[in-house]
Amino acid sequence: MELTYQVKDALVIRNQAQFHPVKYFQELVRVIQDKGGLIFEQARAIDITHQSQQEKGTLQENPRPILFNANKNFGIEENLFR
């Protein structure tokens, strides 16, 4: 890349990953939905038991987990970096 100013010294870190948050969440949503998961917007959880009471309704018990760790490996990392 051509710079418009002079550089005396620089630090280069080769093969450094670049995280793209939009790509991350697009792929995360795709994987969750492909595995039968549901994503709810504007549905703050008030209580989570066998039935989850929410501001706008109740979720019935589901054999799939409702909550998950976003850091868990879902096999999507190869699509997250540019």
Image: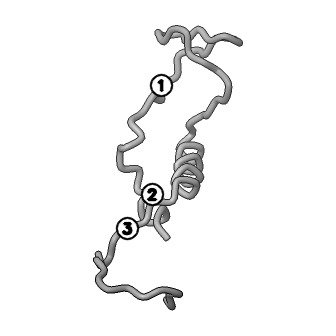
Asked whether 3 or 66 is in front, the reply is: 3
Point out the frontmost of discs 2 and 3: 3
Q: Amino acid at mark 2?
A: Ile
Work out whether mark 2 precedes mark 3 in sequence or the reverse, and give the earlier one: 3
Q: Disc 1, disc 3: CB below 8 Å?
A: no
Apparent side of residue 42 relative to residue 32 in the rendered image (left or right): right
Q: Amino acid at mark 1?
A: Pro
Residue 61 spot, x, y in % from top left: 53, 16
Q: Residue at x 51, y 8 (%)?
A: 47
Asked whether 73 or 51 is in front, the reply is: 73
Residue named by callout 2: 76
Work out whether mark 1 precedes mark 2 in sequence or the reverse, and give the earlier one: 1
Does residue 69 sit above or below 63 in this rendering? below
Q: Quadrant of residue 56?
A: top right
Measure the alpha-carbon separation of dots 2 and 3. 15 Å
Q: Residue at x 38, y 85 (%)?
A: 7
- SS class of the residue under badge 1? loop
Q: Disc 1, disc 2: CB below 8 Å?
A: no
- SS class of the residue under badge 3? loop
Q: Residues within 10 Å of mark 3 (few under 14, many from 20)?
A: few
Q: Residue at x 48, y 86 (%)?
A: 5
Residue named by callout 3: 17
Residue 18 spot, x, y in % from top left: 43, 65
Asked whether 50 or 18 is in front, the reply is: 18
Apparent side of residue 20 relative to residue 78 in the rendered image (left or right): right
Residue named by callout 1: 63
Q: Residue at x 55, y 9 (%)?
A: 46
Residue 78 spot, x, y in % from top left: 43, 66
